[in-house]
Image (cartoon, grey):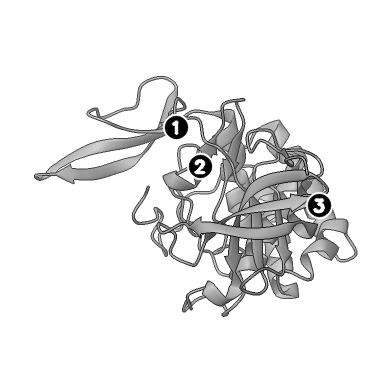
Amino acid sequence: MSAPERIPSRSVTADAAELLACGELTVRGRIREASNAALFCSVTLDGREAACVYKPVAGERPLWDFPDGTLAGREVAAYEVSEATGWGLVPPTVLRDGPYGEGMCQLWIDVSAEAELLALVDAEEPEPGWRAIGLAEVGEGRTALLVHADDERLRRLAVLDAVINNADRKGGHLLPTADGRLYGIDHGVTFNVDNKLRTLLWGWAGEPLTPEAVDVLQRLSESLAEGGALAARLTALITPIEIDATRARADALLASGLHPEPSGQWPAIPWPPV
């Protein structure tokens, strides 16, 4: 028997979702840094193979502000919204059965070590090409300015996070690849009906949305309406009221024409930030 054809994680293929959904899933190890059970796996189908992450619902820790057993569906919903934008910011993600029951299965992404998206600088203002997030303690009573790159890919991700109401956009959830793409991962705490936006990507707060973002938000709003294609895909993943709230957030962004600013009612930056 010949070895299966491996799909490089750095090259997301059009049939990755089919491979993830229908392939044979084999657990290879556990990702211990994750707060919920996250298993590193391989998935094979018809001579194709890829690395992936499998997060079983049974391994989700209860949260006070999200219903139990819903995080995997929210991860898949984030992928569906990302695909609807056309930006492809979330790796292919499906909901499927696995060795430990139903869970989220997502294509593994190889990260480029050369890409720098976040930095701590000893300055009051960021240099050109960077955006300020805020001051961070660095020990011995000292602080430094935390900055993120003034990067079009990050700006798109900031818009996506505002729409899906991401409560946990940390630096470790940003995956730049060697071919110049950027992915965001770990979207379990999203789509809450209350404002929960917590992110490191505040560098454009209060600034006008790009024309591209406005076009994307208009398409999202239409597709999230009752009978819309995206609303139909989300029905099995999140509740009707959460779908309505997602459309309301897209509409609110369109009405303001601006990137959102911290509400002041919820911690604006996740902890730890990385």
Is disc 3 surrounded by few (<14), some (14 to 19) or many (20+) residues within 10 Å? few
Q: Give residue 188's position: percent from left, percent from top.
A: 56, 63
| Residue placed most toward the observer, 125 or 81 | 81
The number of numbered discs placed on residues in the rendered structure image is: 3
Residue kind at label 3, given as amino acid type: Glu
| Residue 249 visible in rendering | no
Q: Give residue 73's position: percent from left, percent from top.
A: 67, 67
Q: Give residue 237's position: percent from left, percent from top.
A: 73, 69
Q: Are marks 1 and 2 in contact (CB under 8 Å)?
A: yes
What residue would you read off at disc 2? Answer: 174
Considering every residue shown, the one lying at the far front of the view is 1
Residue kind at label 1, given as amino acid type: Leu
What residue would you read off at disc 1? Answer: 117
Q: CA distance from mark 1 to mark 3?
A: 31 Å
Residue kind at label 2, given as amino acid type: Leu
Tell me the tag on residue 18.
Answer: 3
Q: Is residue 237 above or below residue 256?
A: below
Quarter of the image where one finds residue 15: top right
Quarter of the image where one finds residue 146: top left
Question: Between disc 1 and disc 3, whose residue precedes?
Answer: 3
Query: What residue is at 52 percent from the left and 61 percent from the top?
Result: 38
Tell me the tag on residue 96.
Answer: none
Q: CA distance from mark 1 to mark 2?
A: 8 Å
Q: Is residue 132 above or below residue 262?
A: above
Question: Which mark is in front, 1 or 3?
Answer: 3
